[in-house]
C-alpha cells in the first residue's frame, strides 16, 4: 500500500489492544484507528435518541446521517459524533455493557466495516478491534491476536477505573468482561475469533513494552 502496511490487532476486551496499537502506530508513524470506538459511538447515539438497541431499521436510518471522526489527543485520541466530542461518553459503563448488542447487527457491521476499509485502504495503519484480521482487512500484512486471562484483564480495567474515580469491584468487572466476550464470540456475523494467519500473543504476564517489542519485531521482518 502507498503509505505502508496494514496492521490488524484483534482480541477480547481489555487484552491491551488499544494501548499497544497506539504505541505501534507512534513507533512506525502510522495512523491508529480504534474500531471499538465506532461501535461505541453508534451505541451512544442510539441510546441518546431512545432507539431500542435491537431496532436495526431505526439504527440504520440514524447511521445514514451519522458522522464518526477522530482527532489526535492525549492521553487518548478524541472521538466525535457529528462534530460533538464523545471521547469519555462512549466509555461509560452503560455504553460498555450495551455495545455488544449493537455490534451483533448485520447492517451496522457492514456499514462500519466499509468505513474502516476506507480508512485503511492506503495502508500505514494500525487498526484494533474484534474482526479486523478476519473480515475488515483479510489481507492485512500483519495480524496480531492479543489475549490475557480474565482475572488479569479485570485487574487492568479495575486500575483504569480507579484513575477515573470509579470503583466497581474486580469480580463484577470480570463478570462483565466474560459476558461481553461471550456475546462477541458467539454472534452470527463476524464473531471474535483468531484469523488463521494471525500471531497469538498471551499478554497475561507480559508488560506493555514487552508486547510492543514483540509486535515491532514482527513488523520489522515484514518491512525487510
Ligand atoms: O476497549 P474494549 O476492549 O472495552 O472494547 P472496544 O474495543 O472499545 O469494543 C467495544 C465493543 O465493540 C466490543 O465488545 C464489540 O462488541 C464491539 N466491536 C466489534 O464488534 N468489532 C470491532 N471490530 C470492534 C469492536
Ligand atoms: O483495548 P483493550 O480493551 O484490549 O485494552 P486496553 O484498554 O489497551 O488495555 C487495558 C489496560 O491494560 C490498560 O490500562 C493498559 O495499560 C493495561 N495493559 C497492561 O497492563 N499490560 C499489557 N501488556 C497491556 C495492557
Image: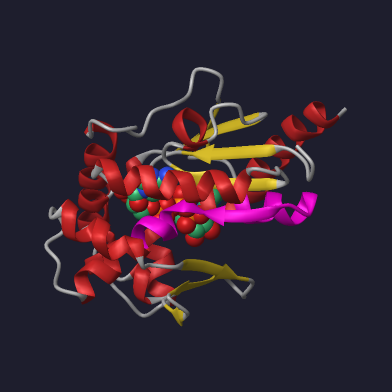
Q: What stretch is highlighted in magenta?
A: 21-40
Does residue 30 show up magenta in the picture?
yes
Residue 51 place in picture, x, y as percent: 15, 67
Residue 209 place in picture, x, y as percent: 68, 49
Which residue shows up at 54% across the image and 34% down it?
137
Q: Quadrant of the C terminus?
A: top right
Query: Is residue 103 shown left or right of residue 224?
Result: left
Which residue shows up at 63% across the image and 41% down it?
211
Above or below, 223 relative to 120: above
**Is residue 129 visible in this depiction of the protein?**
yes
**Is residue 151 visible in this depiction of the protein?**
no
Q: In which quarter of the image is the N terminus?
A: top right
Which residue shows up at 51% across the image and 48% down it?
116
Query: Is residue 55 shown left or right of residue 206?
Result: left
Quadrant in which residue 86 is drawn: bottom left
Above or below, 143 relative to 164: above
Residues 101 and 69: in front is 69
Residue 181 place in picture, x, y as percent: 28, 41
Quadrant in which residue 189 is drawn: top left
Amino acid at each position: 500500500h502507498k503509505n505502508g502496511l496494514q496492521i490488524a490487532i484483534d482480541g477480547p476486551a481489555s487484552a491491551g489492544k488499544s494501548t499497544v496499537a497506539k504505541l505501534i502506530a507512534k513507533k512506525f508513524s502510522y495512523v491508529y484507528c480504534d474500531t471499538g470506538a465506532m461501535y461505541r459511538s453508534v451505541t451512544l447515539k442510539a441510546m441518546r435518541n431512545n432507539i431500542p438497541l435491537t431496532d436495526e431499521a431505526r439504527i440504520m436510518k440514524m447511521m445514514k446521517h451519522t458522522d464518526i471522526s477522530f482527532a489526535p489527543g492525549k492521553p487518548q485520541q478524541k472521538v466525535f459524533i457529528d462534530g460533538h466530542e464523545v471521547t469519555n461518553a462512549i466509555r461509560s459503563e452503560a455504553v460498555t455493557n450495551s455495545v455488544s448488542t449493537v455490534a451483533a447487527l448485520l447492517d451496522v457491521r457492514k456499514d462500519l466495516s466499509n468505513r474502516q476499509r476506507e480508512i485503511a485502504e492506503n495502508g500505514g495503519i494500525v487498526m484494533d478491534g474484534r474482526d479486523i484480521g478476519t473480515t475488515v482487512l483479510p489481507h492485512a500484512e500483519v495480524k496480531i491476536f492479543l489475549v490475557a486471562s480474565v482475572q488479569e484483564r479485570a485487574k487492568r480495567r479495575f486500575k483504569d477505573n480507579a484513575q477515573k474515580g470509579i470503583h466497581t469491584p474486580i469480580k463484577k468487572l470480570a463478570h462483565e468482561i466474560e459476558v461481553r466476550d461471550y456475546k462477541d464470540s458467539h454472534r452470527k456475523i463476524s464473531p471474535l475469533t483468531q484469523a488463521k494467519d494471525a500471531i497469538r500473543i498471551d499478554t497475561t504476564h507480559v508488560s506493555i513494552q514487552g508486547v510492543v517489542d514483540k509486535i515491532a519485531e514482527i513488523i520489522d521482518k515484514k518491512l525487510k
